[in-house]
Image (cartoon, rainbow, N blue to C red):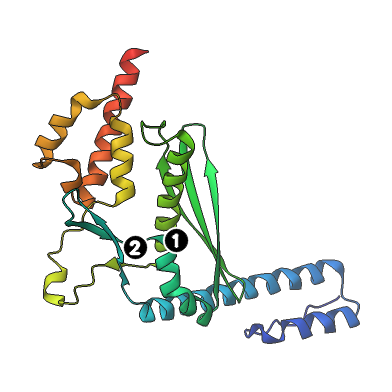
């Protein structure tokens, strides 16, 4: 009866073992078992190397500076944020150093949601996908539907990318004592999304401002802005159901 050689626990010699099995004219079944073990060992090794590289990257990655300034109508600094190109420029060398590459793709569902996918690849073969969905809206008085979609896509790409690599953004103030109490201003894409949804629904603006105790939407924090988006979507869903 044909016996299958014992597979070494170290996957480095699996290719040699397969070559030996071929030379000894092992059965197709045994060769398939060896090939399956080879795939499992390589996948396990690739995952281990991916996790090690990601941990090393995150340990070395700085908090990304918000170098894009948005001013108010009277010329004061309203808020800062880090655009996609600025984030990539600050981490590109580190990604290459630790063996990472990435691609970004887009999915659009029938429900009007657009999802950005950041596919992270490591040189040793493991890949992982980070997804970030956004809700598409119609064009506004200032933006066509195409421009609204482009803005939503930019927003989704940035968050999918940062989530994929665990990248954090922060203000240029390096005072560690203040970091825990800093309130992040509303992201410009979040503010745009809120304003887009409110076109034709201006009657609910006063209740929004009252709920969050602000006099204008740009004064919302980013957490408040995301909460506001969810509440507006829920309101519009309820209104749509009543109208059908």
Residue drawn where x is 28% and y is 52% of the image: 187
Residue reaching furthest top? 244
Disc 2 packing (10 Å; few <14; some 14–19; many ≥20): some
Q: Name the residue under label 1.
A: 161
Secondary element type, mark 1: helix
Q: In the picture, which quadrant includes the C terminus?
A: top left
Whole-percent x and y of residue 19?
A: 83, 82
Question: Residue 26 got which mark?
Answer: none
Q: Which mark is residue 82?
A: 2
Most foreground residue, 127 or 24? 127
Q: Position of residue 153 (x, y in %)?
A: 46, 47
Q: Which of marks 2 and 1 is in front?
A: 2
Image spot of residue 11 (x, y percent): 65, 82
Above or below, 125 relative to 145: below
The answer to whether residue 91 is above or below residue 205 is below
The image quarter in which residue 26 lies: bottom right
Q: What x and y, as percent, mark residue 57?
A: 43, 78
2 or 1: tag closer to the N-terminus: 2
């Amino acid at each position: 009866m044909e016996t299958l050689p014992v597979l070494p626990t170290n996957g480095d010699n699996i290719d040699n073992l397969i070559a030996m099995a071929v030379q000894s004219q092992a059965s197709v079944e045994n060769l398939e078992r060896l090939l399956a073990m080879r795939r499992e060992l390589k996948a396990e090794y690739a995952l281990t190397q991916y996790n090690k590289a990601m941990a090393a990257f995150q340990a070395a990655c700085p908090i990304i500076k918000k170098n894009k300034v948005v001013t108010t109508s009277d010329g004061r600094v309203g808020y800062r944020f880090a655009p996609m190109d600025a984030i990539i420029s600050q981490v590109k060398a580190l990604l290459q150093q630790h063996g990472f590459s990435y691609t970004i793709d887009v999915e659009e569902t029938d429900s009007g949601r657009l999802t950005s996918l950041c596919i992270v690849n490591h040189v040793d073969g493991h890949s992982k996908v980070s997804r970030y969905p956004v809700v598409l809206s119609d064009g506004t008085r200032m933006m066509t539907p195409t421009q609204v979609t482009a803005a939503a896509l930019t927003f989704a790409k940035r968050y999918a990318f940062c989530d994929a690599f665990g990248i954090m953004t922060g203000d240029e103030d390096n005072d560690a004592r203040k970091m825990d109490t800093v309130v992040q201003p509303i992201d410009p894409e979040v503010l745009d999304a809120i304003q887009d949804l409110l076109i034709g629904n201006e009657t609910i603006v006063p209740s929004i401002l009252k709920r969050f105790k602000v006099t204008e939407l740009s004064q919302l924090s980013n957490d408040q802005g995301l909460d506001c988006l969810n509440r507006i979507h829920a309101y519009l869903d309820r209104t749509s159901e009543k109208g059908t």
